[in-house]
Image: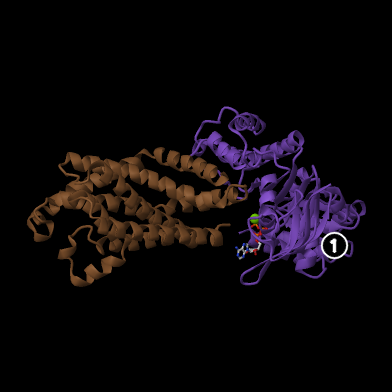
Amino acid sequence: MNLVADTWFQIQRHIRTQFRMPVWIFVNLFQPIVWLVLFTQVFKSLSDMPGLGGTSYLQFFAPGVVVMTVMFGSAWAGMGMLHDIDMGILSKMLATPATRGSIIMSRVIASMVMLIVQALIIFTIAVIMGVDLATGVPGVLLTILLVSMLGLGFAAFSNGLALLLRREEPLIGVITFATLPIMFLSSTMMPADLLPGWLDTVRHFNPVDYAVVGVRGLVMDGYIWSDLWRSLVVLFGWAALGTAFGTMMFRAKAE
Amino acid sequence: MSVIVTHHLTKVFPGGVRAVDGIDFEVNAGEIFGFLGPNGAGKTTTIKMLNTLIEPTSGTAVVAGFDICKNPAEVRKRIGYVAQDVGVDERATGRENLTLYGHFYRLDSKTIKKRVKEIFELVDLAGYEDKIVSTYSGGMRKRLDIAMGLIHRPEVIFLDEPTAGLDPQTRVRIWDYIRNLAKAMGVTIFLTTHYMEEADHLADRIAIIDLGKIITMGTPDELKQSISGDVVTLSLLTAEDDDHNELMRRTESALSAEPFVIGTQAVGDKLAVYVDNGESAVPSIMRLLAGQGIEVETISMARPSLDDVFLKYTGRTIRAEEGTATTFAQIRRKRIRRQQ
Ligand SMILES: Nc1ncnc2c1ncn2[C@@H]1O[C@H](COP(=O)(O)OP(=O)(O)OP(=O)(O)O)[C@@H](O)[C@H]1O
Ligand SMILES: [Mg+2]
């Protein structure tokens, strides 16, 4: 009970903080739009390629933008924790009876909430731009479930790293270093059939790819349950792994 | 009744630093207990152990009736912690900061609302409840920081260097709030500081800590009385072309040679001379310096301050009891270096 209450009060704090930074909100909403417009322009000629089966690149890429937004957004979630460490907020909190778990959980959930809102906005814009959602609203809900698991894993990892590294520069370094390759080592930008062989193998070890495959299926083809189940299981595993790492770091390093 | 009792409390950090080295003390209910020591003495480490933020390497303590090792959760409910660095959320309002803490201590919303009003008045922040903290001044933030440790009416509140880094005026005001709060709420206060005046001003009892060990403990008066003798402070008349430093050095060496002088110490452009008996020392000093052609501009005599107590006790641990000019100068230099 206390865990739920503490988590709830802190989620309010985190979300309030975000809304007090209008520039941040603007950038986060604007960025996916830029991606949608820019990338579909750059890759316009790809629409004729065999892997796309005649669909537009926008139709192909929109699910990728949703996944990318969630991935990048949650990968940076640890910065908030670092701020609390630097400002002495964390150690002050630890001297209160606040449940330990709520401190990291509220951060991860707050990130999720913000990212789900972003994902919904991207879907809306994509539909306006002409994307056809094969599975409609239920598909969007399933998408939300998939990307939430993906983001939860990343956010928890990021918070754990913040606790481990404790300084801004290394944390920024690690996140920047990790996110781009993680995105390119997947079928986010390119149909899997068009990837070189080694990349097609590597992507099977990448949680982002499972999210992309799952979401893309829902948007383009309908319910392909074999793919969906695999994505769900892997992403639940990823979320559990991230949570375990985050919690472990919190136990060991929070002081 | 004791609110804090420690039993051989010890913390050894990885790498072998004995930050806190087997200390024993008791803090009585309702008193302001000052923990006085230079930088790196082990003050924060002690507070963090008492606050259950870090575990002792050995030994333990009972805080507000519960053992910090066996029952940290119960301890946390009964204490307030105001860290050395201000720990408020600058992107939230004062009320939001306080309310979150109210919830952590399981107070209901009505009680929280009432207490926020009370506490903001107590620390003189009334009217600023709904302003974002980043618009507060440094002193206001510190007051909010202290207020956050009070929302649940703790039995004991820990203040780690509450006025470090604040300007002298703000410092005096914070002192007023702290004293006020002890009176208004009857809360026991455990306070660390490396400002002598602060300990002298606020604390009912003081423990002096250096290199992880308690060197001496008592009321400010007891501690001052523990030093025999007086302090004679004098300033020298410097002619235009005289070298002031050179003159000070000559004066110091002339005085240290005298048997009635325990030690000397430069304090700004004045010279403090520690002597057995002030009344008879003043004329002797005047005579001696006149004989050397050194002119005294002002001279005054005082009972020792806590500063002198500290010097005496740390002097003993840092170096063997010599009481010469060099010892005092070295201690002073060492102290300054540590503060940097
Ligand atoms: N996490 C740590 N790991 C290793 N050594 C530490 C750690 N924290 C403190 N120390 C060492 O322990 C000693 C005591 O530190 P502490 O912070 O308790 O001093 P302090 O009295 O609070 O000093 P200050 O007035 O500077 O705040 C110092 O020598 C410090 O370097
Ligand atoms: Mg300290």
Label 1 Cα crowd, 10 Å radius (few <14 / some 14-19 / many 20+): many
Residue sitting nearer the eye, B143 or B139: B143
Chain on which label 1 sits: B
Quarter of the figure with the C terminus of chain B: bottom right
Q: Is residue A203 left or right of residue B204?
A: left
Residue at 40% x, 38% y is A19
Q: Which chain is brown?
A: A
Question: Chain coloured purple: which letter?
Answer: B
What amino acid does circle 1 point to? Answer: Ile
Figure colour scheme: by chain
Q: Quadrant of residue B339?
A: bottom right
Q: Where A145 sits versus B178, above or below?
A: below
Q: Secondary structure at mark 1?
A: strand
> Is residue A15 visible to us here?
yes
| Front in this rendered view, residue B197 or A11 | A11
Q: Which residue is mark 1?
A: B262
